[in-house]
Amino acid sequence: MIAIFNKFKTGLLLLILSISFTLVSCSKDDGLEVQNDFPFEINVMPVPKDIANGQTVEIRIVIQRTENYHHTQYYLRYFQFDGQGTLRYYDDDPYLPNDLYPLAKEQFRLYYTSTSTVSQTFDVWISDSFGNEKQVSFQFNNSN
């Protein structure tokens, strides 16, 4: 009878210790944070400084992630300040200024076609699904 009572006390003590350990370890802040911000950088290959009316310039862009989160979606929008032209993704229809377009790849080419005889300036904004955003500015002088 005493042996059963000792086993019961030992089991009860182990149960109390394991519950106490679990509660202490759950409430402890061990500095782990869930990352929900995945910054990125934009790399652009050099483009010509001058463009003629009707000429098309290829703009090669690479999105470089600092972290590789599988479900990140990237978007593009642009706004033209000076001059006139069209910006398109590969053979797609031209983009409308300040509309948001999803990007299928992190390495892609844009094509800007001048429809102006003056200098042209526009910005391309690339954002991700976490609210990060990068701006790239382009300026082309008119060439005859």
Image (cartoon, grey):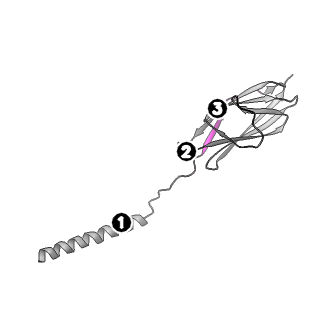
Q: Amino acid at mark 3?
A: Phe
Q: Is residue 89 left or right of residue 38?
A: right
Relative image position of residue 20 (x, y in whole percent): 34, 70
Q: Amino acid at mark 2?
A: His
For the record, the magenta segment spans 37-48
Q: Which image quadrant: the C terminus?
A: top right
Q: Nearer the viewer, residue 138 or 108?
A: 108
The residue where tag 2 is placed is: 71
Question: In front of the other: label 1 or label 3?
Answer: 3
- The quarter of the picture where residue 9 lies is bottom left
Question: In front of the other: label 1 or label 2?
Answer: 2
Q: Which image quadrant: the N terminus?
A: bottom left
Measured in 3D between alpha carbons, the distance from the residue under mark 1 to the one under mark 3, in whole angstroms, is 50 Å
Q: Amino acid at mark 1?
A: Thr
- Is residue 127 inside the magenta stretch? no
- Is residue 39 inside the magenta stretch? yes
Q: Secondary structure at mark 2?
A: loop
Task: Give the mark nearest the N terminus, 1 or 2.
Answer: 1
Name the residue: 78% across, 37% down: 122
Q: Does 125 sit above or below residue 6?
A: above
The residue where tag 1 is placed is: 22
Name the residue: 44% across, 60% down: 30
The residue where tag 3 is placed is: 108
Measured in 3D between alpha carbons, the distance from the residue under mark 2 to the one under mark 3, in whole angstroms, is 18 Å
